[in-house]
Amino acid sequence: MKPETHCIHVPYQSPDAYGALNMPVYHTLAYEFPDAASMVEAFCGRSSDPDYSRVTNPTVIYLEKRVRELAGARDAIALSSGMAAISAAVMALAGAGKNIVTSRHLFGNTFLLFNDLLGRFGVETRFVDMTDAAEVEKAIDADTCCVFMEIMTNPQMEVADIAAISGVTRGKGVPLLADTTMIPFTHFSASRLGIDVEIVSSTKYFTGGGTALGGLVIDYGTVDGFNDRMRKEMVMNLGAYMTPHAAYMQTLGMETLHVRYARQQAGAMAVADALSRLPGVVGVNYPGLKDNPYHKLCMEQFCGNTGAMVTFDLPSQQACFRFIDALKLVHRSTNLFDNRSLAIHPASTIFGPLTEEQRRDMDISPTLIRLSVGLEDADDIIADLTQAILKATES
Ligand SMILES: *Cc1c(COP(=O)(O)O)cnc(C)c1O
């Protein structure tokens, strides 16, 4: 089966009393057992019967099964948000005295989690240039618990050579964790590139409509003890397992993912192309553009996929604000890969709580606009962007 067929043809575990075609939403937190012995089996993890929905729930298990099968992974663990997934996966490996090797080009909350929160627990974060595998190698020592990277950084749109980095991490015996939110995991093979643990904010491409938060930890079974730590410590003790309702929304989202993604990527390409020819636009970042420095690498490692996020620079921060204010169709909103097109000025919003120096270190430019291209007709999106850019840059 091709992935787009497989996505919608994963049977759920047990027959439903009514033969429901969709997996029912099990809005329950506890489960009843026929006898004491079967309770012992379930609570001690020797049977797969659900016991408590902080730890396992049939609707969530079904989403996990779909993800696991599609990724060809050993396990997929569903959490309540992308940040919950990142926190749990990293905390499963980190401890006082350990260090994380990563880039400064990180999602804002991931940066704060590593630098501030984990820092308070005695975990050191080492920032390197991910596009330089030799620098990654130099930063790794005996206390490195993982290398953490984003496959396409948001909003800098930097793409590192994943196979080069995994060559280093495999050589050193250090797990490589990658946040792959920017390209759907169904569209390229993370394990073939040497990623040990893939982390996805399923809030983004999977739900599509922007209806439910979610995070996935996709475990390829290459890190000793990781799965036990995730299931037995992180899921149970952090208490951030996905809710059945969110799992249901994401399961539905996954069924239309291929159709939505193809259209959104084509839209992003058309938008990036139009923006690059518009007077008033200082520069456009989209790896689908042939002159983008990451074009070739992106096409190769992500099997021709370049995502549906485009960033571009206007002459000043004031012009960015005027642009945002002038939008009529594109929504002023955060989130990515919603069905609707969304625009945001990252420096003053998502990265607003950081200091100016931190923003400078992370290359968050005050003149940058981030655009998530939705399902609308590309000509309509381009027309709105064009009128807003004209208003923002005239006189
Ligand atoms: C949105 C996002 C996250 C965080 O996901 P949430 O579901 O909002 O917690 C992490 N990484 C990247 C790259 C993201 O875009």
Image (cartoon, rainbow, N blue to C red):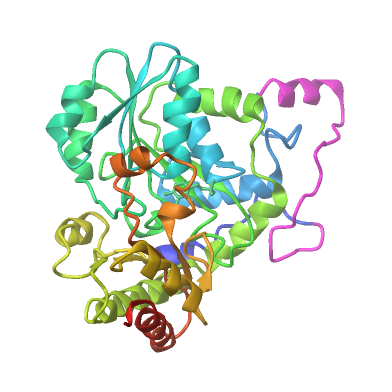
The residue lying toward the viewer, choosing from 200 and 311, is 311
**Residue 184: x and y, percent?**
41, 57
| In the image: residue 372, left or right of residue 58 | left
Is most of the magenta stretch helix, strand or loop? Answer: loop
Q: Evaluate whether residue 149 shows in this view.
A: yes
**Which residue shows up at 71% across the image and 34% down it?**
54
The residue lying toward the viewer, choosing from 217 and 95, is 95
Q: Quadrant of residue 390?
A: bottom left
| In the image: residue 42, left or right of residue 189 | right
**Residue 274: x and y, percent?**
28, 81
**Residue 325: x and y, percent?**
50, 73
Q: Is 139 rendered above or below residue 375?
A: above
Q: Is residue 11 magenta?
A: no
Q: Is 328 rendered above or below residue 368?
A: below
Query: What segment is highlighted magenta in the picture?
Result: 17-45
Spot the residue most to the front: 395
| In the image: residue 94, left or right of residue 160 | right
**Residue 215: x and y, percent?**
54, 45
| In the image: residue 29, left or right of residue 342 | right
Q: Evaluate whether residue 14 shows in this view.
A: no
